[in-house]
Amino acid sequence: MIRTAQSVIAGYAVIALLVIATDAVVGAAFHGTRKTFTIVNLAAALPWAAAGGYTAAYIAKGKEMGAAIGLSLFAAIMSIVTLAIDRGRQPLWYWGALLILLAAGALCGGYLRSRQTNKLVA
């Protein structure tokens, strides 16, 4: 249980670090506007979440899909919390799309890892 919780935190940290790095590159290279950041964040959300889901599943060893589901739920909760805190800076559709992409990406990453270990149980 503790290992699974740690794997969820590590997976979310991977997502956060990739998003921060992407935002830094977009800001430096393109002098990003809000519209640019919106497009890039949505485009990167699925692969970055998949990387986080894969990392969480890798760390969870034996509970790969459980970790991916946990990360998916945690990312969804954090999206809702961020929406509540940052209301009005992005349109509501953005937060809905981001929530779906993060949750789906985390599940996909966990699924990829579980396929490698042949363990598709939660």
Image (cartoon, rainbow, N blue to C red):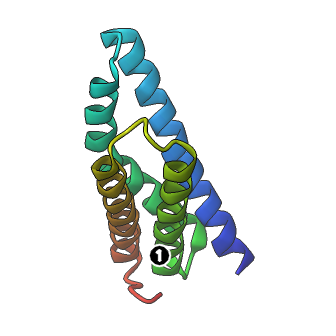
Q: Does 14 sit left or right of 4 as displayed?
A: left
The residue that disc 1 covers is 69
Is residue 1 positioned above or below 76 on the image?
Answer: below
Label 1: which secondary element: helix
- What residue is at 47 percent from the left and 75 percent from the top? 69
Give the quarter of the image for residue 109. bottom left
> 109 or 42: nearer the eye?
42
- Pinpoint residue 53: horizontal percent, then vertical percent: 45, 62
76 and 19: which is toward the camera? 76
Please name the residue shown 43% across and 35% down the image: 89
Image-quadrant location for residue 119: bottom left
Residue 93 percent across, percent down from the top left: 28, 51
| Quadrant in the picture for residue 104 | bottom left
Neighbour class for label 1 at 10 Å: few (<14), some, many (≥20)? many
Vertical side of 121 occupied by 72: above or below: above
Quarter in which the N terminus is drawn: bottom right
* Extreme residue toward the right, this view: 2
In the depicted structure, whether residue 120 falls above or below residue 81: below
34 relative to 65 in the view: left or right: left
Mark 1: amino acid? Ile
The residue at 35%/73% (across/down) is: 111
Q: Is residue 22 above or below residue 43?
A: above
Percent from the top left, x then y, of residue 26? 36, 20
For image coordinates 39% across by 47% down, the residue present is 48
